[in-house]
Image: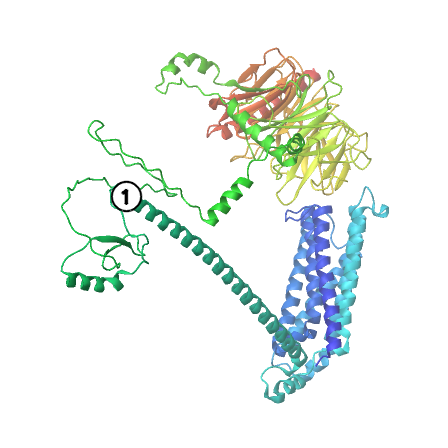
Amino acid sequence: MMATENRREFLLVFSAAVFLGLLSITFVLIWVLQYREGLAWDGALAEFNWHPVLIVTGFIFLHGIAIIVYRLPWTWQCSKLTMKFIHAGLHLVAFICAVIAMVAVFDFHNGGKIPNMYSLHSWLGLTALILYCLQLVLGVGMFLIPITPVTWRAAFMPLHVFGGLSLFGSVIAVALMGITEKLIFGLNNPKYKDLPPEAIFTNVLGLLLVVFGILILWIATRPSWKRPSDQILHTLHTNGGDPKPALSCGIMSDKSELKAELERKKQRLAQIREEKKRKEEERKKKEADQLKDAAIQQEESDLEKKRRDAEALLQSMGITSDVPVVPPPTSPTANTPSEAGSQDSDGAAGPRTLHWDSDPSTLQLHSESELGRTTPKLGMAKVTQVDFPPRETVSYTKETQTPVMTQQKEEEEEEEEIVPPQPVVETPIEKLDQKEEEEAAIHELTEEEKLQILHSEEFVNFFDHSTRIIERALSEHVDLFFDYSGRDLEEKEGEIQAGAKLSLNRQFMDERWSKHRTVTCLDWSPQYPELLLASYNNNEDAPHEPDGVALVWNMKYKKATPEYVFHCQSAVMSAAFAKFHPNVVVGGTYSGQIVLWDNRSNKRTPVQRTPLSAAAHTHPVYCVNVVGTQNAHNLISISTDGKMCSWSLDMLSQPQDSMELVFKQSKAVAVTSMSFPLGDVNNFVVGSEDGSVYMSCRHGSKAGISEMFEGHHGPITGIHCHTAAGPLDFSHLFVTSSFDWTVKLWSTKNNKPLYSFEDNSDYVYDVMWSPIHPALFACVDGVGHLDLWNLNNDTEVPTASSTVQGNPALNRVRWAPSGREIAVGDSDGQVLVYDVGEQIAVPRNDEWTRFVHTLAEINENRDDAEELAAQRLAA
C-alpha cells in the first residue's frame, strides 16, 4: 500500500510528465503547421512532416505511458493479466505510429529522389525500431502465452525491464538528433546558426522531450512506487471480509470525508431553498391580500353609489320613505318567516316601506306595524302609470368592443338620455405599469451623444452593410415592357445574331479609384463567381492618393461602385483571391512587399504585409499564386530579380522557403509571368524579360530552373498553361504572349514553339486558355483588340474579335471559371466584361478528339517547315 505522502508525490510527478508529453505533441504540431508545409500524404514535404508528429506522439509519449502503466495506483485493483494486455496494447500502438512515420520518410525520399539511410540519425532510428519490435514480440511470448515456464519469465524479467528503459532513452536521443538534422537542412535563409524563431521553438521542443523522459524514468525506477505483489494485494482484498480493496483505505477515508462535506453542503442548500420558498410565499400572500382589500373597498364604494341612484330614482317616481332611519339590513332567510306570520295574522296589508338587504338585487318589504308605527286610513287615489325604459349600462373592458347599432325612429322616439360611462378603476399593478411607461418616455439625444453614436464601430458596420444593400436595389434595371410572346425578338434578331459571339456585358470604372490608373491584374473569386478583383498602379495626376489600389467589382448587381476598396502605399502589380480563404485578397507590390487584405475588417489598408528585408522580395512582384490543397497550401511569389518565395498565409514575417531562379549558374532570370500546370504544385513555367521561357521545379533534386524554351524576340508579357480538364490530358501545353506581336503555342516536351499566331499588329499583353474548352484561348493587344482563337476551327485568324472603343491598350485578360464570360482591363483604368456566345464557349463532345488531330497537323506542318528550311540552308 502506498503511503499518503508517497501517493501525493507520485501524482505530482505523474501529472507533470503527462502535461509535458501533451505539451510536446502540441509543440510538434505547431512546428509542422506553422513553420513547415503542414500535413498531407502527397509525397512532398507535407508528407515528411508526419514523421516528427508520429514519433513524438507514439514512439515517445505512448511509449513512456506504457512503461509506467503498472505503477498507477488506481490500476492495482485490476488483475495482473488485464494490466499485461493494457501494457502490450499501448506498446503496439506506439510501434504502429513509428512504422507509419518511417513509411512517410521513405515515401518522401523516393518521391524527391533523395538517398535513404545515409545519416547516423537514420541508422540509429531504424535500429531502435527493430529492437523495439523484438522487445514487443519477446514480451508477448514470455508474459502473455500461458505455456511459458515461470522460470523463463523470472529470468527474462530483468532483461525486459532494462531493455525497455534503454530503448526509451535511445528513442528520445534519436529524436533530438532528427530535430537538429531537420533544422540544419531546412533552414537556409536565415540559417540555424542565426537562431531564427523556428530554431528557438524547436529547441524548446527538445528540452520538453528530455524532461519528459527524465520524469518517466524516475517514475519507473522509484522502488516505493512499485506495484505490490499479488499476495499482498490478495491479503488486502480479504482482510476484514470487505469485498472492496483494502488497498484504497486511505482513499476511502478521504472519500468518506468528502461525502460528509457534500452532505453538509446539500443540507445547507436545502435550507436556503426552503427559506427562499417561504419568503416568496409570504410575498405572494401579502400582494394577494392587498389586491383583495382594494377590491373590497371598490365593491363597497360601488354599493353606496347604487343605493343613492336607487333612492333618486324612487323620488323621481313620487315614492318617498317616511322612515327617517332605515333599519339595519337583515337577511331574507331570517326575516321571511316572521313577516309571513304577521301578514297572515293581520288579515290586511298595510303600507309598506323598502328595506335594503346586503344583496343590492334583493328588496325586502316591511309593514309599518313591523316598524312600530300606527296604520294610516286608506282612501281612493288616481293612479298614473308611467313606463320607464330600462337603463342602459355601459361598461368598458380591455378587450375589443364593437358598438351595437339599434334602429330608432327620430320622429316617434324621444331623445334618450345618455348615461356617461363609469370610469374604470385601475388595479395597483396597472398603475405600476402605467408609471413605468411614463418613466420610459423617449429621451432626446444631445449633439454629443449623436456624434458618439455616429462614430461608434457598431453604427459604422451597420451603415456600411445597409448602404451596400440599398445601392444594389437602386441599381437594378428591369425591362418592364418585355414581351414573352417573342414578338420583340423578331425585331432584334439581327442585333442578336451580330453580337452572338462576343458582346459587352458590363463596364466598371470609378472616378476616384480607377480613373487614370492602369489595370495590372485581374482575378475571379473561386468562392463567389460574381466577384471580380482588379488591381491598379499609381495615378500620376493624384499624388496624394494611395499608389496601389485593388477593387472588388460585383457582376450580380448593376451598381457603378466597387463592392470593396483596398489600397496600399505601393503600386499593386499582381493580385489574386486567396484559395481556401474566401475573405482574403493577396497583392504583390512594386516595392516587393506581399500584402493581405481582409474584407471582414473595416480597414482598407492591408491587415498583413511582408517585411522589406533581404529575406523577402526587394524587387517588383509580378507573380502571385496560391497552390496546394485545403489543408496544405502555400502562396508562391516571384519578383523580377528571379527570387521565388513560398509563404504561409498565416505568417508573413518570413518565407517558409526561398529560391533564386538561375539558369546554368548564370545571371538571375527576370521573371515577368508565371503559370502552374493543371493539378501540379511542384513544377511551373515562367516567362522572362529576355524573351525565353523556363521550366522550374520547387522541390526535389532538380529544384530550380531545369529547361529553357526559346522562340520569342521580345519580353514575354503573359503565359498560361492548359487548364481545361477532360477525357484527354493536354496539361503539357501552354501559350505565351510577347512584345514581338505574336502568341506562341508550346509543349513542355519540346523546347521549340509548336506554332506562332501572328495576326496582331501591336504588343500582345496577355493570353489565357479557356477553363472549359480544350482548343480555345484569348489574347489582348495594345490597340484594344480582344481575340478568341478556336484552334479546331482556324489557326490563321481569330474565331471572334472585338475592339474596345477608343482603342486603349488592353493589359490583362481573364476567363471566368464558367468559361462563359471574359474580363479585360485597359490602360485607362476600365474593366470590361464580355459575354461569350454559347457556340464558341461551350465545347462539343468531339472537341477533345478534334484537338488531338489539330495538334498532330500542327506538328506535321512544323516538321515540314524545319525540313524545308534545312534544305534551303544546304542549298
Residue 136 image position (x, y, % from top left): 67, 70
What residue is rendered at 69% in x and 48% in y?
33
Question: Quadrant location of residue 777?
Answer: top right
Outermost residue, right side: 193
User: 373 and 736: which one is in front?
Assistant: 373
Compared to 269, does 734 lie above or below?
above
Question: Quadrant location of residue 515?
Answer: top right
Is residue 385 shown left or right of residue 272? left
Q: Residues within 10 Å of mark 1 (few under 14, many from 20)?
A: few
For the question of whether residue 312 can be seen, the reply is yes
User: 177 and 243: which one is in front?
Assistant: 243
Helix, strand, or loop for circle 1? Answer: helix
Question: Quadrant location of residue 631?
Answer: top right
For the question of whether residue 555 can be seen, the reply is no
Residue 428 image position (x, y, % from top left): 47, 49
User: How many numbered marks does the figure carry?
Assistant: 1
Compared to 229, does 502 lie above or below?
above
Q: Which residue is mark 1?
A: 315
At label 1, which amino acid type do we have?
Gln
Outermost residue, top side: 806
Quarter of the picture containing the C terminus is top right
Q: How is the image coloured?
A: rainbow
Residue 22 image position (x, y, % from top left): 70, 60
Compared to 259, does 406 lie above or below?
above
Residue 570 image position (x, y, % from top left): 75, 26
User: 49 and 365: which one is in front?
Assistant: 365
Quarter of the picture containing the N terminus is bottom right
